[in-house]
Image (spheres, helix red, strand yellow):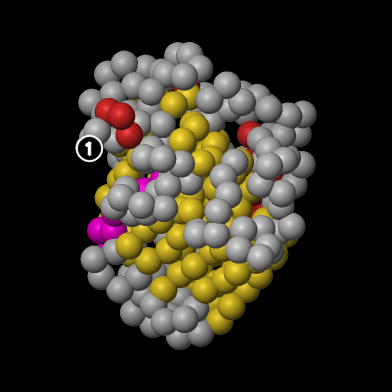
Amino acid sequence: MLIGLNRRGSSTPPATFDPVTELFGSGEDGFLFDLNTPADGYMFEDSALTTVCTATSDPVGGVVDRSGNGNDFLQTVNTGFRPAVDAVGGVYFDGIDDYLAATIDLTNSANLTVMLLVQYDGSGSTSKYLINQNSTSNGSFNYSARDTGNTRWDAVIKPGSVGMNANTGYDYTSGDTFLLTMIVDETAGTSENRVNGVSAASNSGTLTGLSYANGPIALGARDDGASKWANCRISAVMIRDAVTSGTTLADAETYFGAIGGLTI
């Protein structure tokens, strides 16, 4: 699915960067989606993954994981809760009841990298979840959008008070696209929130015992799909249970940013 990425801009991804090999080639768990290419056969109208999305406004009942881990996102609760293929690119979540969900056993490590290519079109004083996970063990993470006093992207990981807030200065009505990157390093006790390839906020604390094992994960809403729906367009998602750094991080951010026409 991650082919022909220049659909919404003129930026160019690294020619030699293969996200499947570079990000998941050493047995990392997680998932990898480019939600911008329905014709490639990885987005389906139904949760049984039988009818390929081919056109704008097609419902999205399932998206197949490209990482090789088989962690597909599905909407099995209600066909009315399915997002749709968006004309601008990616999947459109209506902010009313749309979401996709997966349960992923991120047990290889408490380390974590999340990348999310998003355009947020909502508003309101309450955080709206772009992605949310709440494990049955001892850890959770989310990316949320809010405009309480200032427009910002919030990246939060638990346990304890370790988390991040970053004011990007983003006007939610502008229709701009952002690449958000969250990196959690349990050993170092640090977490970082990056926006468009630049560090926007960081924090530190005790992360011993952090685990994301078997936690439900939702795109476009809270992990249970019952609240905090976000009116947004999501064009790419990557989660891996490892710290991403150095050249790999730089290449990955350039690669995903290019999907949205961002030069990173």
Residue at 41 percent of width and 40 percent of height: 96
Whether residue 171 is in magenta: the answer is no
Q: What number of labels is visible?
A: 1
Residue at 63 percent of width and 34 percent of height: 259
Q: Specify start and end residues of the magenta stretch as a single range.
A: 213-219
Is 138 situated left or right of 32 in this image? left
- Image height of 126 relative to 191, above or below: above
- Which of the pair 125/70 is nearer the observer? 125
Q: Which residue is mark 1?
A: 77
> Can you tell which quarter of the image residue 201 is in?
bottom right
- Image height of 159 relative to 16, above or below: below
- Image height of 170 relative to 39, above or below: below
Q: SS for tag 1?
A: loop
Is 74 situated left or right of 258 in this image? left
Residue at 59 percent of width and 41 percent of height: 121
Residue type marked 1? Val
> Can you tell which quarter of the image residue 134 is in?
bottom left
